[in-house]
C-alpha cells in the first residue's frame, strides 16, 4: 500500500477475490505497472464492491465469475503487456466509466459489457486494438458518451450500442476507428462530435435518431449501414 487508500499489486501477480468473500477496497486500485504478462490481472469469484468514485487501473487480464459493483468509479484497462500478449476480458460486467488506454498490446473480449456512463478509448498505439475472442461477437452498451481519441481500432465484431435515455455524443479520432455502432436510444438524439470512422456496420434502430446535421461531419464506413424494420 503505497499511499492512503491506494492498493498497488506488483507485476506477475493476480488480485483474486475468493468465492463467498467480499472485497471493498475503499480507494484506488492498480494492478501491474508496465511490461506485464498474462499472469497479471483481476479474477473475481466472490464480490467486489466499489463505494465511490475510485479508480481501478488494470494492466492485465480480467475475469468476472462473481459480482462486480462499480459504484461511480472509473475502470481503466491499461495495455502495458509484453509483446505477443493480449489481455482477455471475460465475464459479463457492468462498469460505470470504462476506459481503454496504454501503449502496449490489445484486448480480446470474451463477454458483453455495460457502461453506465462514458466509454473512452485513448490508446496511443495502433496495436492496442479491441477485438472479440475467436469468431465471437460482443457488445459494449453505453448510456453516456463514446469518446475515441486514440490511434487504436475497435474491430467490427465488437459493437458499441448507444442506448441511453438522454442526449449522447459519439466521437472518433482521425487515426483510429470504432468497430460496429448501433444507435438504440429512443428517448433522445445521438449526435456526432467528429467525423465517424468505423470498421464495422452502422445500425439505427426504429425510433432512434443519429443527428449528423451539426458541423457537417462525415461518416466513413468500411462495411455498411443498416436500418432494421419495425417487424
Image (spheres, rainbow, N blue to C red):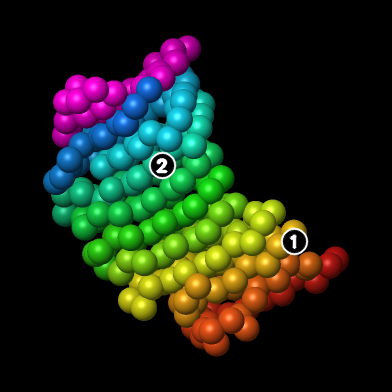
Q: Regarding mark 2 in the picture, which secondary structure is present there?
A: strand
Q: Residue furthest top?
A: 20
Principal secondary structure, stretch drawn in magenta: loop
Residue 112 sits above or below residue 52 on the image: below
Q: Is residue 15 magenta?
A: yes
Say whether residue 139 is visible. no
Q: How far across and how far down the image is residue 212, in percent?
A: 61, 80
Callout 2: few (<14), some (14-19), or many (20+) C-alpha neighbours within 10 Å?
many
Residue 26 sits above or below residue 201 on the image: above
Dot 1 corresponds to which residue? 186
Say whether residue 48 is visible. yes
Instruction: Check residue 118 in the rendering and tell me which mark sits there, or answer none.
Output: none
Residue 62 location, quadrant: top left
Q: How far across and how far down the image is residue 55, in percent?
A: 35, 37
Q: Is residue 24 magenta?
A: yes
Residue 14 sits above or below residue 198 on the image: above
In the displayed structure, does residue 24 sit left or right of residue 224?
A: left
Q: Regarding mark 1 in the picture, which secondary structure is present there?
A: loop
Q: From the viewer's side, name the closer residue of 91 and 207.
A: 207
Q: What range of the chain is rendered magenta? A: 1-25
- Proximity of marks 2 and 1: CB atoms separated by less than 8 Å: no
Residue 78 sits above or below residue 194 on the image: above
Instruction: Check residue 74 in the rendering and tell me which mark sits there, or answer none.
Output: 2
Q: From the viewer's side, name the closer residue of 2 and 184.
A: 2
For the C terminus, which image quadrant? bottom right
- Residue in view at x 49 percent, y 61 percent: 146
Residue 28 location, quadrant: top left
**Number of residue marks:** 2
- Residue in view at x 38 percent, y 22 percent: 26
- Residue in view at x 71 percent, y 62 percent: 188
Q: How far across and how far down the image is residue 83, in percent?
A: 16, 54
- Residue in view at x 75 percent, y 70 percent: 228
Amino acid at each position: 500500500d503505497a499511499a492512503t487508500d491506494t492498493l498497488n499489486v506488483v507485476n506477475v501477480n493476480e488480485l483474486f477475490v475468493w468465492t463467498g468473500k467480499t472485497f471493498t477496497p475503499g480507494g484506488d486500485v492498480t494492478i501491474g505497472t508496465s511490461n506485464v504478462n498474462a499472469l497479471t490481472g483481476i479474477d473475481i469469484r466472490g464480490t467486489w464492491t466499489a463505494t465511490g468514485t475510485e479508480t481501478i487501473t488494470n494492466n492485465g487480464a480480467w475475469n468476472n465469475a462473481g459480482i462486480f459493483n462499480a459504484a461511480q468509479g472509473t475502470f481503466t484497462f491499461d495495455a502495458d503487456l509484453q509483446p505477443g500478449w493480449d489481455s482477455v476480458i471475460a465475464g459479463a460486467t457492468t462498469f460505470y466509466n470504462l476506459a481503454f488506454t496504454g501503449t502496449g498490446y490489445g484486448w480480446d473480449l470474451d463477454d458483453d459489457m455495460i457502461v453506465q456512463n462514458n466509454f473512452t478509448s485513448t490508446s496511443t498505439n495502433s496495436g492496442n486494438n479491441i477485438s472479440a475472442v475467436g469468431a465471437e461477437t460482443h457488445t459494449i452498451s453505453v448510456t453516456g458518451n463514446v469518446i475515441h481519441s486514440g490511434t487504436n481500432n475497435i474491430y467490427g465484431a465488437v459493437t458499441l450500442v448507444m442506448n441511453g435515455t438522454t442526449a449522447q455524443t459519439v466521437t472518433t479520432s482521425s487515426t483510429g476507428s470504432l468497430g460496429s455502432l448501433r444507435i438504440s436510444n429512443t428517448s433522445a438524439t445521438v449526435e456526432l462530435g467528429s467525423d465517424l470512422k468505423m470498421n464495422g456496420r452502422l445500425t439505427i434502430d426504429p425510433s432512434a435518431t443519429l443527428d449528423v446535421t451539426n458541423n457537417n461531419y462525415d461518416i466513413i464506413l468500411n462495411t455498411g449501414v443498416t436500418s432494421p424494420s419495425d417487424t
